[in-house]
Amino acid sequence: MPSPFILDRTSVTQVMAWVLAALLPGIATYVWLFGPGILVTLSLATVTALAAEAAMLKARGYAVKPFLADLSAIVTAWLLALSLPSLAPWWLIVTGTLFAIVVAKHLYGGLGQNIFNPAMVGYAVLIVSFPVQMTHWAGPNELTSVHLTLAQSATVIFGGDMPRATLDAVTMATPLDALRTGLLQQLTVDEVMTHPIFGHYGGVGFEWLAGAFLLGGLLLWALRIISWQVPLAFLAGIWLTAGFLNFFDAGRFGPPWFHLFAPSVMLGAFFIATDPVSGATTPRGKLIFGLGAGFLTMAIRTWGGFPDGVAFAILLMNLCVPLIDQYTQPRIYGGADKEPRA
Amino acid sequence: MSRELFKFKGGVHPPEHKAESTSRPIHAAPLPKKLVIPLRQHIGNPAKPVVEIGERVLKGQMIAAADGYISTAVHASSSGTVTAIDLQPVPHISGLPDLCITIETDGRDEWVAHAPLDYQAMEPSQLRMQLRDLGLAGLGGAVFPSAVKLDPGASHACTTLIINGGECEPWITCDDMLMRHHADEILQGVGIMRHLLGSTEILVGIEDNKPEALDSMRSAAAKLDFAVEVVKVPARYPGGGAKQMIETLTGRQVPSGKLSTDIGIQVFNVGTSYALARAIHHGEPLITRLVTVTGHVLRPQNFEVLIGTPMHTLITLAGDRDGTTGVLMGGPMMGVPMPNLDVPVVKATNCILVKSAELFPPLPKALPCIRCTRCADACPVELQPQELFRFAKAGDFGRAQEYHLFDCIECGCCSYVCPSHIPLVDFYRYAKSEIWAREKDKRAADLARERHEFRQFRQEREKKEKAEKLAAKAQAARAQAALDQAQRAELAAAPAAEGAAVSDTDAKKALIAAALARAQAKKSDAAPKNVDQLTSEQLHQIEEIEARRTKIRELARKPLESEEKKP
Amino acid sequence: MLAAIGVMVLLAVAIGLVLGWSAIRFKVEGNPLAEKIDAILPQTQCGQCGFPGCRPYAEAIAKGEADINQCPPGGEEGVKKLAELLGVEPKPLDEAHGTPKPKSVAFIDEQTCIGCTLCIQACPVDAISGAAKQMHTIIAAECTGCELCLPPCPVDCISMVPIAEDLPHWKWKHPVVMMKKIAETEGA
């Protein structure tokens, strides 16, 4: 084997492990503010993802051990689980995870080959196919009268008997849902915002969750596992679009801080849009990718059919990556300032 | 130092491992029994042997001369007898042998006559020729003939001369040791370079992990009658690369595809400068160099080694240990694994790095690229290594070239940081050599096409000329026939040539017969008349002329003969 | 009605003039497609394709009279390139026209050569130097390895010598560290 003969210590496994670690503050906050149900979702998604990954690797003639050890399947599973409603039924979680691992990842060629973020593909499939089940969000403990234990959450998720009334007492519309519904009922933003779910910036509890994801994201950035371009551009894209709309008509469009402090935005900005495999690679490309995803997220939230648009925005931008990369090749050492394009 | 420094993009910080080999003084390696001196030690044409097997040579005697402009001479590193000029293993990654001159040393180490050169009195071009004949080549690693680099050219002046003491590669310390102990001579060499290049600004760049070298060079520079600025630069691999050193010191970048001289900057390694000083002030050709022997050995240190010394003798000197897993020439980032240890030390050998499983654990297996762009962040040339990898792997060499494959300096930073442990540089080397091979094939095909087309054109032309000649002859023959009734036999050819049922070949045969008859007749007529009393010299001349004539005749006959032989 | 016909006729005349003018103005010399095909062919001039040289084969391909898989020296890669140029599916080499061999050059055993010049006439690229009753020799740098000189030699003194790999011709190999390998070596 020719040079170099020494390597830096980082490995894919390490990178993935850090991503998982950076999700922990978010998960802890989730459990603290929304109850332990998310742990069931996370575990189920993890087990499903590992099983699917192992089966696919075997079927494709790859060694199972080194590829399972890269932890990428678990990252996908966790990201999907954190995007799903915390009391989503088990089959929803399994279907989403299977779709993410089998179709979005392995049918595209496995690790490093998928052009779409697998977790977001799983999410998109679920929200398109099962919109009703995708609203089973547990409300923040602060606002709900009933607090489910871990076992109760598991019962809900696995479809066990649970009085309808209890379930209704636990689940709640997310702030984004509430805003959307309110605006559709011709209410102004200020009127909608009187609903108890709205907190200082985002929703009650939700804003803390967003903060926790932000914290984890900053950790990843400090470790240079993600670059600053994508999250910053993504957040800027949302803030600028929301700010512009809000400035225009504060009655019909939510304030920019509210849009920024949704957990899905922080998760998307720091953990999903930064997925290197399906994202842009050049520095300028990353900025365009982030800005585009932010703008599309706001566009879908404002004019689209879904309350949140992070997943679709990122998938749409994934689609543009080859184009973005080709046209944003950086100037090389000693290169001309303007590069001729092929 | 108040000089403003600039930061080149990318780079890595591998563990330095320099202290191991700097704690011991420089030792002169003993004279080996056998020296194997490769003829291709530099970039450009290999040197051409000028000695013969069995010839006794002296230390410093030229044994192979430079062949062309970009080439340099090769010298005997010690006195002895040439025992072979043949293919021998050389320090190259392929393990393929190359042409070498083997010298059995006689232990007397007897110098050839040599004297200092008065370089200031010499014509620059003449001085450069001398340097070429003294075998000077860049000792930083690229081994480019120094005489070529010391030619400022007609149009551009080299205002800035940079002496590179960066030595950024881990483990290697030969430049460091050279600067510590031979700073004066290095700067003498700088004086000669300044003279040849007409530089007005002279900078010595030394990484900050070599404080002793910095001190030594600074105090030596203070004694000079011209200004040399010794600059401390931050240690970062590959800061010792010529282009990176230029950017660090001047903030300027060498345009892609151009040379540093195009922006008025020339860079030399400190070792080259030292060798230049030895060559000019002592008349000594490049037959020795400093080599760091380090890694998995008992006494890591620097040796002054004769070019051609087998590597294993140096490892033995430094104390070989059990558990060696291989030997590199150069450092761990850009070094070349040695196929065996009989290969000689060459001008490019800056370091012999002995590997062990502990120091150099086997590299983990490669995983797929996850496009994390750590490689792009580390690339000092600001390339997109992940894209180059994709194209090289897929064999899409055209796209690889569009993405500036040939700007890659193969420093290894990308492979070093890759979390998937992909040997990226390998893919670039593969793609580059594949592109070169294809270009070579294309040139060969173009040549073949050209030659084939010319041959067809020539055949056409010959056919036409022959037809014309035949027609002319037929005409002549007819005229002859009318005049001379006695040679009726020959007339058979005439109607044949006119196309009267007799084949072309028959006509030709008849013509040849006629021609032969005529020639015979002429020969007897034209007997030489003045050949009675000739000197031996004249006789010899005549013989030569006759020989040439027969040859010409044969040549002239060839087309006809060959026509006949065709089935 | 008449006006419409008139307009159409005028239009036809105008467009026809433009077409005619551009046909003269932008006339392409020769057959550009054959030219492009010829550029891909290896120029061995061996005739294994059944045509007397690379150029005629290129012209035949351009006219659709020959298939793209008749050139063994070009190898599979040559076929692939031709397929790409012509926009057709690549196909395996036609074995009837021979199989690819390692690149070789002809070598004349000078002891045996009788100087008959037959090989000189056979060589498509004039890479053999010599004269009648004189020893012949191959200019190795110009030999394409077409083997056309082998059959005419009456004393069989020409042999094909594969080009040995030496330092200046050495190439880096494709790194063999790829991902599937893990499966083979550590396979679960």
Image (cartoon, coloured by chain):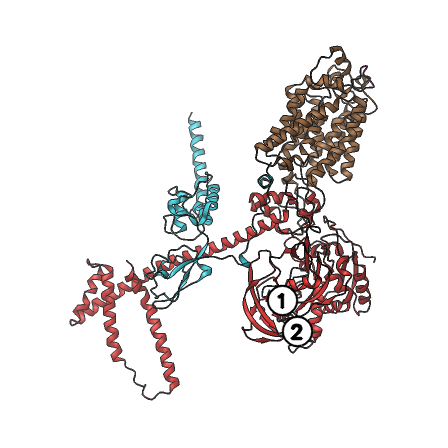
Q: Can residue B162 be seen at all in this image of the molecule?
A: no
Q: Please determine whether, in this image, residue A69 is positioned above or below residue A93.
A: below
**On-image quarter of the C terminus of chain A:** top right
Q: Amino acid at mark 1?
A: Gly
Badge number at residue B223: none
Residue at 26%, 66% in the rendered image: B473
Q: Which residue is mark 1?
A: B308
Of discs 1 and 2, which sits in the foreground? 1
Using residue B419 as the reference point, say whether residue C83 is left or right of it. Answer: left
Q: Can residue B325 be seen at all in this image of the molecule?
A: yes
In the rendering, at what x and y percent does residue A32 appear?
A: 81, 24
The disc numbered 1 marks a residue on which chain? B
Q: Is residue C113 magenta?
A: no
In the rendering, at what x and y percent does residue A153 appear?
A: 74, 18
Q: Is residue A144 magenta?
A: yes
Q: Which residues are magenta?
A: A140-146
Q: Please determine whether, in this image, residue B383 is positioned above or below residue A101.
A: below
Residue at 66%, 73% in the rendered image: B123
User: Which chain is rendered cyan in the image?
Assistant: C
User: Label 2's element?
Assistant: loop
Q: Which residue is mark 2?
A: B123
Circles 1 and 2: CB atoms closer than 8 Å: no
The disc numbered 2 marks a residue on which chain? B
Rendered colour, chain B: red
Q: In which quarter of the view is residue B240 placed?
A: bottom right
The earlier-in-sequence mark between 1 and 2 is 2
Q: Majority secondary structure of the magenta segment?
A: loop
Q: Please determine whether, in this image, residue B151 is positioned above or below residue A14.
A: below
User: Which chain is rendered brown in the image?
Assistant: A
